[in-house]
Image (cartoon, helix red, strand yellow):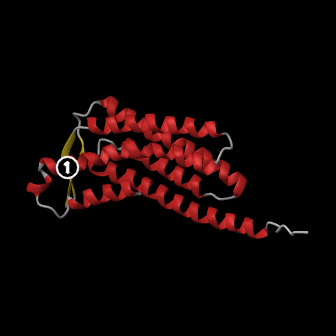
Amino acid sequence: MKCLFYDAFIVSLGGVLGHSIIESGFFKFLASLRYVLHGGLIPLLFLICEEVLKPQNKLWFKIVLSITIIFSLLGIIEGFLVKLELVETGVISRYAASDLTEKWVMKSSNIITILSIIPIIIVGIVIYIKRKIPYLFLGGSSMFIFAALGGAISKLREYNFFVSMIGEVSMSLFYYIYILNDNDQEEEEKAIEPKKVDV
């Protein structure tokens, strides 16, 4: 969620700051951090899956944590390798990935994003079957769809970022709703548990 706020904040600054500031090296660096944060934080979805399923075997946490660290490091490296250029979207000026960015960087970034989303969808299905809570599945599905749409219109750099962001916002909102419902369900289960009577 903080990553989304940073994304939106930096992009919104492009609509109010003057070109002299936007074109400065410092602002370009701040804009590049959007890609670094995205690459580093998206793999945290693996940890969300582990937390939701709560596997009894502690080895699973170590495995998931290792995968998360590897994917996050790769995402951070790719974020730094993105070449930026200034584009105009209406009244907003923002930095987007340019054609000078190596194709493998963008492709591997998309692969990491998709591989991080698929487990959320699968876990969402499991949770819906077991507990009839659909929000994790809806969040993962919406993020996957909008990520795919963003990739499909990658040549339209003016808009593909906003399309992808819709999916990330949807995922965050659905996950928040899931947490609220999960907490309510746990409280209900505790309330109906028979209390032990001391004899």
Instruction: Please name the residue shown 14% across and 54% down the image.
Output: 22
Quadrant hosting residue 191:
bottom right
Q: Position of residue 197 (x, y in %)?
A: 86, 69
**In the depicted view, which residue is nearer to us: 26 or 99?**
26
Residue 13 drawn above or below residue 45: below
**In the depicted view, which residue is nearer to us: 174 or 43?**
43
Q: Please state, as top left, top right, bottom left or bottom right, where the N terminus lies in the image.
A: bottom left
Quadrant hosting residue 186:
bottom right
Label 1, residues with CA under 10 Å away: few <14, some 14-19, many ≥20: some
Instruction: Please name the residue shown 34% across and 29% down the image.
Output: 104
> What kind of residue is marked 1?
Val
Q: Is residue 109 visible?
A: no
Secondary structure under the numbered disc 1 in the rendered image: strand
Left or right: 44, with 82 as reference point? right
Left or right: 2, with 99 as reference point? right
Q: Which residue is denoted by mark 1 in the rendering?
A: 87
Q: Is residue 162 visible?
A: yes
Q: Position of residue 100 (x, y in %)?
A: 21, 33
- Hey, which residue is sitting farthest right in the picture? 199
Instruction: Please name the residue shown 35% across and 44% down the image.
Output: 153
**In the depicted view, which residue is nearer to us: 196 or 181?**
196
Q: Position of residue 101 (x, y in %)?
A: 25, 34
Number of numbered markers: 1
Q: Position of residue 135 (x, y in %)?
A: 58, 58
Instruction: Please name the residue shown 44% across and 50% down the image.
Output: 146
Left or right: 44, with 53 as reference point? left
- Hey, which residue is sitting farthest front in the picture? 199
Q: Please state, as top left, top right, bottom left or bottom right, where the C terminus lies in the image.
A: bottom right
